[in-house]
Amino acid sequence: MSTKPIRDMFDALVPEYDRFNRLSSLGLDVLWRREVASMFSKGSYILDVGTGTGDLAKELVSQGMDVVGVDFSSKMLDAAKEKMAGNPHVVFELAKADELQFGPRTFDGITSAFVIRNLHHGNILSQSFREFYRVLKPQSQMIHLELSRPPSGFLSWGHKAYLKFILPLIGRANFGERWPKDYLSTTIEKFPEPKILCQQMRWAGFERVCHYPLNGGIAGLFVGWRC
């Protein structure tokens, strides 16, 4: 899928996007974003890639950081700007993850929530990692929160059943005809294994690369440092 159809798809989801995230994750997405923000130091200057409606940016600001949120969807950014209106610690800009308009070594940290699956699906993840490395200051970390697959056992079976039967019901109830059918489950199922993704981060130059599973592996944090 090329960039434009993905952008159009996300544009159409904006009005119910936050509610869907809460319902589909049983509220865990809020806790996961809080965990991400807690891993940066207060006062840091953070780039939030694929900021969407600004939920992670809002959490980062609440924990004492200054944030630049970028997204390729202008409608998502409109929602984020409305959510954070008047807050001097955050700005939102239209940008693609693989073509960042910032100078080298600009940010104290880089993060995203539920974004790198889409970059992988759009075949721009490797270039995006190189861009993240370029704009990140030395001795600083990049943290990506992403949905994934439990490795094995009963939880893996239940997760597959959830993606196939429950998630579409929630999606159609929220978005109606705008629900993008199998897009979410497909991007989760085709997302690389953590060890493969970690290797891609190393190829872009990152060191001390780690993967931390969350809630049995239904989500995870991918962490890398520019040393």
Image (spheres, helix red, strand yellow):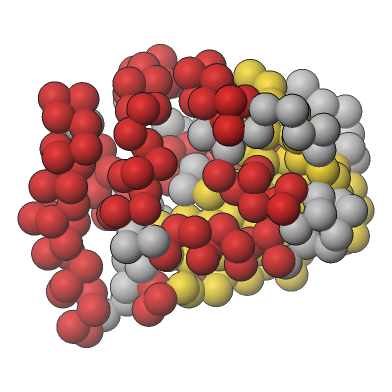
Residue 201 position by quadrant:
bottom right
Relative to residue 188, is residue 140 drawn left or right? right
**Total number of numbered labels?**
0
Residues 178 and 201: in front is: 178
Name the outermost residue toward the bottom: 153
In-image side of 220 versus 130 (left or right)? left
Relative to 226, say whether 87 is above or below: above
Which of 204/167 is in front? 167
Tell me which residue sits at (51%, 65%) in the image: 31
Q: Is residue 124 above or below residue 136?
A: above
Residue 119, percent from left and from top: 48, 37
Residue at the spot x=34%, y=59% of the render?
25
Which residue is found at the position 52% from the left and 34% from the top?
A: 53
Q: Quadrant of the N terminus?
A: top left
Q: Is residue 92 visible?
A: yes
- Residue 61 in the figure: left or right of residue 160: right
* Residue 158 image-quadrant placement: bottom left
Image coordinates for residue 96, horizontal then vertical, percent: 60, 24
Instruction: State left or right for residue 98 relative to residue 46.
Output: left
In the image, residue 112 above or below residue 81: below
Question: Which residue occupies 32% across, 76% down?
Answer: 151
Q: Can residue 128 be seen here?
A: no
Q: Is residue 70 above or below residue 48?
A: above
Q: Quadrant of residue 13?
A: top left
Q: Quadrant of the C terminus?
A: bottom right
Q: State the image coordinates of residue 10 (x, y, percent, origin top left).
A: 38, 26
Q: Residue furthest front?
A: 86
